[in-house]
Amino acid sequence: MFRNLNLSMLLAPMAFLLPTLPIQAGETKPATPKVAHRTVRIDGLDIFYREAGPKDAPTLLLLHGFPASSHMFRNLIPALADEYHVVAPDYPGFGYSSAPPANEFNYTFATLADVVEKFTEHVGLTKYTIYVQDYGAPVGYRLALRHPERVAGFVVQNGNAYDEGLDNDFWKPLKVYWKDRTDENARPLRGFLTLEATKWQYTHGVRNIEAISPDAWTIDQSLLDRPGNQAIQLALFYDYGSNPSLYPAWQAYFRQHQPPTLVVWGKNDKIFPAEGAAPYRRDLKNLDFHLLDTGHFALEEDGDRIATLIREFQRKFVAAQ
């Protein structure tokens, strides 16, 4: 009785069960964008950076936090480089950039901003969206004040610009150190430079600790443990006290220039809690605001979501300028 039925008739009712093949026969899967690992000379320092994507595409300048480096963007860069020119430098004293001793180099956030500014000019960046996290905020916002015409927008991931973001117990010993820079007041801060503290920054507040690669804190700690690096980090801990006095200027910049801004903030962060994210809403009109259920290094757990949000933000807010 089935003699006159052909195969297509038998398979037709089951077609909806068959998976859709993402790649047709004869086609090749698009290659993952390659990331270049480069070094340039800035003011006598070797500045290491990661770069990917077409140079004529819109640029994303990724500025890392403490105790990290451009390594924190290792997954985000190739995730965006098919559509964007993505550049992530290491500051002096971090990652694979030069780390001169603290008594031979002025480790301040103003100096870090100087180096990054010269770096952008050296590699030919004239317009960019700045991704800021932790230390990246005081570096990136200094750049914005100097050259507002170069800033296409911001992506803010746990990067502070408001007093509310420093109103918690984590900052108490730092505030003591800012007022009185003594060895005694530095002693509790050395605890921030241990493996236990570095691992805590990556794992506290995450949904699934098994999703966090130990490579992240192991690499960071190996660089923190280099001879002389503790003095570098203590110098920056002290100079972080120079940032709150600039908050009013940064906020005035937000109100005047209204840079399109995407907030992707790990709301469980004990260093920069969600209270520091909310005030951005006061000053910015072109704002896409997201609190993520994760910790300080949100990219480790929510990198795919953040990459998607950046694409949507760039297309909706930045490309429309």
Image: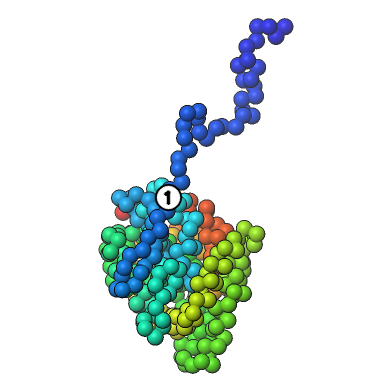
The amino acid on which the numbered mark 1 sits, given as a three-letter code, is Lys
Q: Residue at x 65, y 24 (%)?
A: 14
Q: Establish if 67 lies above or below 286.
A: below
Q: Is residue 312 above or below residue 182?
A: above
Measuring from the top left, give residue 294's x and y in whole percent: 58, 63
Residue at 39% x, 86% y is 103
Residue 1 in the figure: left or right of residue 256:
right
Residue sitting at 38 percent across and 51 percent down? 53
Estimate the x, y position of residue 76 in percent, counting from the top left. Answer: 47, 55
Q: Position of residue 43 (x, y in %)?
A: 29, 73
- Quarter occupied by residue 31: top left
Q: Which quadrant is home to the C terminus?
A: bottom left
Mark 1 secondary-structure assignment: loop
Which residue is denoted by mark 1 in the rendering? Answer: 34
Residue appearing at x 52%, y 35% in the figure:
22
Q: Residues within 10 Å of mark 1 (few under 14, many from 20)?
A: few
Residue found farthest to the right:
1
Q: How is the image coloured?
A: rainbow
Residue 204 appears in the picture as rendered: yes
Report whether residue 156 is seen. no
Count of labels in the image? 1
Q: Position of residue 174 (x, y in %)?
A: 51, 84
Nearer to the camera, 291 or 311: 311
> In terms of image quadrants, where is residue 235?
bottom left
Work out which quarter of the rendered image holds the N terminus and state it. top right
